[in-house]
Image (cartoon, coloured by chain):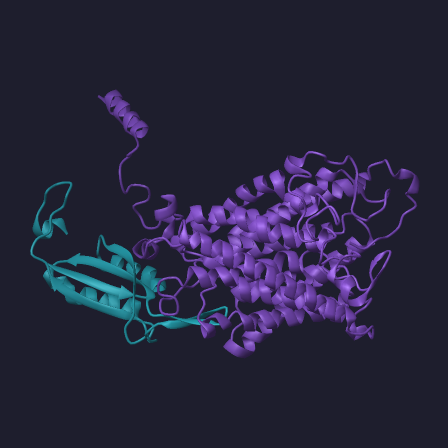
Chain colours: A cyan, B purple
């Protein structure tokens, strides 16, 4: 099993979610995040004082998938999240040892 | 207060109901300026961890000054006039202590008839001025002072700085147009008073220079916030800043037009001047920002509004509407420039009480000497009025500066001003008030169980019932 984590632009979330649903993914976890990569932040001016805002609002999306699906899921996310402009985000995959569904106690792939 | 004489000579014993109603409504409008207008304006400009403390400083001043004003404040400001007061500097605190000896009929115009109001209506109106003047100072020391010290400061400062200056300017004291005033000393006087009467229609010296200077001194004595100039300290809620500025503007009509004490032609002129000067100041601020920083900002618009209102306050009864536009444009640009000075000189006047209130207050008071349609330098009436304006402005700077320094140093040595550094970094709201302004995140209200005994018992009963 794998955990796919994607950091995307907040306004791309709906497209990514729909694309994942169309692929057959049945659940995901979404959280608000802040960060920066090559995009860096931006500056704001209040009463003449300039502030650098390093951290840009982003959305973090996490999906648990079976090993054989992980590469396709990454492709789906890339396709849906891409705008081609700086700040589109990143996707990464890590192995997962164990998954359990709290309600039923099911383990492994059954619990995904 | 200027006069428009009505044939009311036989009405000396009769209340002028129009003026009375007008004054009571205007007093209520001025109250709206402090709570919640100023509280919101300042609250939005602070960081989210200290917004409640900032708003509480306005509400706290309201509580303290409201009581003090009724007890000895009115008496010290307006309770007695020369030669019955103390050297033209301060009124007798006991002449009308606790508002005894109130007159049924009070006339701010100095003759009976037109403009007759109950003296208590005048008390209420003036009370609201004292409250907002103290509250204005709080912006200079945002995020970092003990609430208890602030409450004591409010009582001391209003007593020893506000009441004397109010008495001197409006209570026929040293800075008024009375025969025994400084202006009479310099330019002579007749039986009617000084040849060149100072212009301070609604409180450029009494309110804004006074509060602005106090803010500067207090910021210096209290010291900088932890991380000033290094950590970003940007306004946490700009829409709230704009709501606050809008409420201040609305309430300011009570402040300025109400200072005429009667709903007459001068009050109408004041209303128009107050509006157009404020519009001009906002535009002036935005133009300067666009040229200097590249963007006209929302905080700039809100700040320009306040700078314009401050500048027109002393001058609003003596300028033409065109003169008011000029006064406002200069005020906006001047204050937009002045708010940057604190970084250059290294004092943490957190919300720019100096840049807005002291600078625009000085400009408005002195500008009134240049632009007054009667007596103004730009109208070819010589420099005398301008000299008198500079004189009362500087007097206010000196009195406020010295008195604030003494009070601030005494409080520093006794109660202390600052909350501990780690507490300040964590946020003053939780430390001083045991509250947070906002519940952010998805665990709303579920961070812990009840801790007070009553809440615990209720919880216990609930559990029992469920069993």
Q: Is residue B445 visible?
A: yes
Residue at 36% in and 66% down: B231
In which quadrant is the C terminus of chain B drawn? top left
Residue most extreme to the bottom: B291
Residue B319, image x and y in percent?
77, 65
Pick whichever, B130 or B142, lies toward us: B130
Location of residue B77 with respect to A63 vertically, above or below: above
Q: Is residue B28 visible?
A: no
Location of residue B101 with respect to B83 vertically, above or below: above
Residue B286, image x and y in percent?
58, 71
Residue at 75% in and 49% down: B83
Pick whichever, B57 or A81, lies toward us: B57
- Circle count: 0
Residue B284, image x and y in percent?
62, 71
Q: Is residue B313 left or right of residue B192?
A: left
Location of residue B27 with respect to A92 vertically, above or below: above
Residue B25, image x and y in percent?
70, 43
In which quadrant is the N terminus of chain B drawn? bottom right
Q: Quadrant of residue A44?
A: bottom left
């Amino acid at each position: 099993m794998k955990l796919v984590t994607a950091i995307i632009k907040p306004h791309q979330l709906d497209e990514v979610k729909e694309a994942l649903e169309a692929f057959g993914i049945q659940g995901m976890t979404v959280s608000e995040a802040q960060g920066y990569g090559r995009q860096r932040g931006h500056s704001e001016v209040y009463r003449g004082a300039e502030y650098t805002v390093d951290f840009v609002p982003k959305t973090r999306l996490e999906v648990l998938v079976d090993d054989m699906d992980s590469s396709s899921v990454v492709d789906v996310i890339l396709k849906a999240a891409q705008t081609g402009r700086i700040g589109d985000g990143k996707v990464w995959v890590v192995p997962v040892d164990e998954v359990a569904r709290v309600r039923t106690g099911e383990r492994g792939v059954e619990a995904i | 207060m200027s006069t428009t004489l009505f044939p009311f000579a036989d009405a000396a014993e009769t209340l002028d109901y129009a003026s009375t109603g007008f004054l009571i409504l205007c007093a209520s409008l001025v109250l709206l300026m402090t709570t919640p207008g100023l509280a919101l304006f300042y609250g939005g400009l602070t960081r989210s961890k200290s917004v409640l403390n900032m708003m509480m400083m306005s509400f706290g001043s309201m509580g303290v000054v409201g009581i003090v004003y009724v007890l000895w404040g009115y008496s010290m400001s307006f309770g007695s006039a020369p030669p019955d007061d103390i050297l033209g500097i301060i009124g007798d605190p006991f002449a009308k202590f606790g508002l005894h000896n109130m007159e049924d009929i009070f006339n701010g115009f100095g003759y009976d008839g037109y403009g007759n109001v109950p003296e208590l209506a005048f008390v209420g109106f003036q009370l609201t001025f004292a409250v907002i003047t103290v509250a204005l100072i709080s912006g200079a020391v945002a995020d970092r002072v003990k609430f208890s010290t602030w409450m004591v400061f409010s009582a001391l400062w209003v007593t020893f700085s506000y009441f004397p200056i109010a008495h001197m300017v409006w209570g026929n004291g040293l800075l008024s147009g009375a025969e025994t005033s400084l202006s009479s000393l310099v330019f002579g006087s007749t039986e009617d008073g000084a040849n060149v009467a100072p212009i301070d229609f609604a409180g450029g010296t009494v309110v804004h220079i006074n509060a602005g200077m106090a803010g500067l001194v207090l910021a210096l004595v209290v010291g900088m916030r932890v991380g000033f100039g290094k950590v970003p300290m940007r306004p946490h809620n700009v829409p709230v800043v704009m709501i606050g500025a809008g409420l201040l503007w609305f309430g300011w009509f009570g402040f300025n037009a109400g200072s005429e004490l009667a709903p007459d032609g001068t009050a109408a002129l004041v209303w128009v001047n107050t509006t157009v000067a404020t519009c001009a100041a906002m535009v002036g601020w935005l133009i300067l920002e666009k040229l200097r920083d590249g963007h006209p900002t929302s905080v700039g618009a809100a700040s320009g509004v306040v700078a314009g209102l401050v500048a027109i306050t002393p001058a609003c009864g003596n300028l033409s509407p065109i003169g008011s536009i000029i006064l406002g444009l200069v005020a906006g640009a001047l204050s937009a420039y002045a708010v940057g000075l604190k970084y250059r000189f290294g004092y943490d006047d957190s919300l720019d009480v100096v840049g807005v209130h002291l600078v625009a207050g000085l400009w408005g008071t002195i500008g009134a000497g240049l632009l007054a349609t009667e007596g103004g330098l730009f109208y070819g009436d010589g420099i005398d009025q301008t000299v008198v304006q500079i004189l009362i402005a500087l007097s206010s700077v000196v009195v406020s500066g010295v008195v604030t320094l003494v009070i601030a140093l005494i409080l520093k040595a006794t109660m202390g001003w600052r909350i501990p550094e780690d507490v300040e970094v964590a946020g003053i709201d939780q430390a001083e008030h045991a509250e947070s302004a906002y519940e952010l995140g998805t665990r709303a209200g579920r961070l812990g169980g009840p801790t007070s005994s009553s809440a615990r018992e209720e919880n216990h009963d609930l559990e029992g019932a469920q069993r």
